[in-house]
Image (spheres, helix red, strand yellow):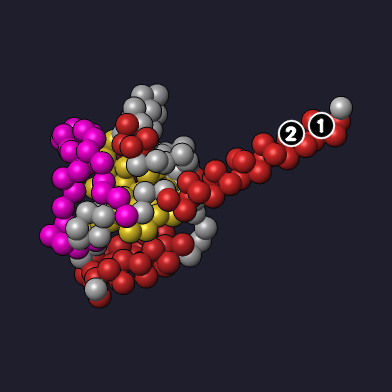
Amino acid sequence: MKKIFLTSMLIGLSFISTYAQEAEADNGKGKKVPSVQLVDVNGQRINTAEINNDGKPVIINFWATWCSPCKRELNAINEEYIDWQEETGVRLIAVSVDDERTKNRVKPYVDASGWEYEIWMDPNGDFKRAMGVNNVPHTFLVDGNGNIVYTHNNYSPGDEHELYEHVKSLVKE
C-alpha cells in the first residue's frame, strides 16, 4: 500500500513539476499586454493595453507592501532607475497587488521610499491574473511594440542588472 501511495505521489509531483516548467517557459513571452481597467495610486483610470512609451521599453513589476523581496527589488532598481531612464528611456510601472485590506498602505510606502515609478493598483488581481502572475515579485519587460519579451519571477540581489541588460538589448535593436 505504501508503494502505491509513494508511486502516486511521485507521478503527481512529476506532473506538477512538468506543468510548472512549461508555464515558466511560456509565461507570457511574445504576447501583448492584455486590456484591463486599473487605477493609478492617485485614482486615475488606466487601460493596461494602452501602455505606451514612444517606442521605448516598459518594465511592469508586480509587487505588494507585504512582500519583502518585492520591496528589495524595487528599492534596488530605484538606485539605478534615473540612470536607466537617461540611457534607454525605459519606463517602469509598479503594479501593486495589495488587496482591499492592505491597499491603503501603498501610497505611504511609495512616498516614504521615494520611488519615481508609476504606481498602479490591482486590488482585485484582474491584471495579475490576465498576465499569468502566480506570485510576486514578477517582472515583465515589454518592447516598444507592446510585446512581452522577458519575464522574471522572484528576486535575488543582482537580478536588476540582468533586467537592465535586457532593457539595453532592446534599445540597441
Whether 54 is among the magenta residues is yes
Q: Give amino acid for label 2.
A: Ser
Q: Which residue is mark 2?
A: 8
Residue located at (81% from left, 31% from top):
4
Q: Position of residue 121 (x, y in %)?
A: 29, 35
Secondary structure, mark 2, is: helix
Quadrant in the rendering for residue 65:
top left
Seen from the viewer's position, the closer of residues 57 and 34 is: 34
**In this rendering, does residue 96 appear at all?**
no
In the picture, the quarter occupied by the N terminus is top right
Q: Amino acid at mark 1?
A: Ile
| Residue under label 1 | 4
Mark-to-mark CA distance, 2 and 1 = 6 Å
**Image quadrant assignment for residue 59:** bottom left
108 displayed left or right of 48: right
- Is 22 inside the magenta-drawn segment? no
Estimate the x, y position of residue 60 in percent, counting from the top left. 31, 50
Residue at point 50% right, 49% down? 22
Q: Is residue 120 visible?
A: yes
Is 103 on the left or on the right of 8, as rendered? left
In the image, residue 18 sits, relative to residue 36, either above or below, namely below
Do tag 2 and tag 1 residues touch (Cβ < 8 Å)? Answer: yes
Magenta range is 30-57
Residue 139 on image: x %, y %: 38, 52
Residue depicted at 24% across the width and 73% down the height: 173
